[in-house]
Image: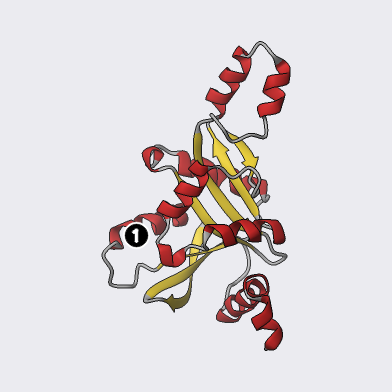
Amino acid sequence: MKTIRITAANADEKIKQLYETAFPEDEQIPWDDLMRLVGEMPLDFTAYYDGEVMEQREHNQSCLNFVESRQNSTESQDFIGFTIVYPRKSFNWLWYFAVSKELRGKGYGQQILTKLIERYEDQPFVLDMESTTQVCDNLERRKQRRTFYLRNGFRDTNVYRTYNDITMTIMMRGEGTFTMQDWDDIIHELQQFWWPDDVKEK
């Protein structure tokens, strides 16, 4: 599996389409705003590609210069999915994690999460996900996601917050605790990038 760091300059239509279809609209940052934040914040936006296919293609190329020019391109490669992480001193916030629809259930999500955890050398992670305690139409899907994260060392923090009638819960991996004050602190941090004028007025 190969990885490419995504910026506004190399984010292609496949990545954009997956982002806009994998998450409920209420949980998305508008794409243009996300691209702005990628440039202004220390975000780790990583796309994942099928390494075996890519390596075979490179082997078959007769021109090494062509191969080198394609190493940082996201075109014509077998796109698997992406993660967006907001690295922080106390913990890393896993903002978004998505696998292409046609590849789900084939172990790619596990490979990506394992690679991500290894990259951060077992530093603490937190993420917010739709709570399984809420009455909803997609309860089974929520339970599957929770089971996936529990299997990978995450735990429930029992910290909940509701946005637009969707209850979110924080899950954490690694040492430490996460409180409602931590949630308020990180939201205030993010507001400085999302609505800097509003933060200044406060």
- Residues packed near mark 1 inside 10 Å, few (<14), some (14 to 19) or many (20 plus): some
What residue appears at the point 44 percent right and 76 percent down from the top-left corner? 163
Amino acid of disc 1: Lys
Q: Is residue 87 above or below residue 161?
A: above
- Residue 179's place in the image compared with 30, above or below, is below
Q: Where's residue 76, x and y in %?
A: 54, 29
Quadrant (top left/top right/bottom left/bottom right) for the N terminus: top right
Residue that extends furthest to the bottom in the rendered view of this protein: 202
Residue 142, picture quadrant? bottom left
**What secondary structure is found at the residue carrying circle 1?**
helix
Which of the 4 image quadrants contains residue 106?
top left
Location of the C terminus by quadrant is bottom right
Residue identified by numbered label 1: 143
- Res 129 visible: no
The number of numbered discs placed on residues in the rendered structure image is 1
Residue 116: where, in percent of width, then height?
A: 60, 47
Across and down, in percent, residue 90 comes to 69, 67
The residue drawn where x is 49% and y is 63% is 155
Q: Is residue 74 visible?
A: yes
The residue depicted at 57 percent of the width and 18 percent of the height is 56
Q: Nearer the viewer, residue 11 or 117?
A: 11
Q: How is the image coloured?
A: secondary structure
- Comparing 109 with 6, the one in front is 6
| Residue 87 position (above or below residue 18) | below
Residue 190 at what x, y percent from top left?
63, 71
Residue drawn 51% across the image and 40% down it: 111
Residue 183 occupies quadrant: bottom right
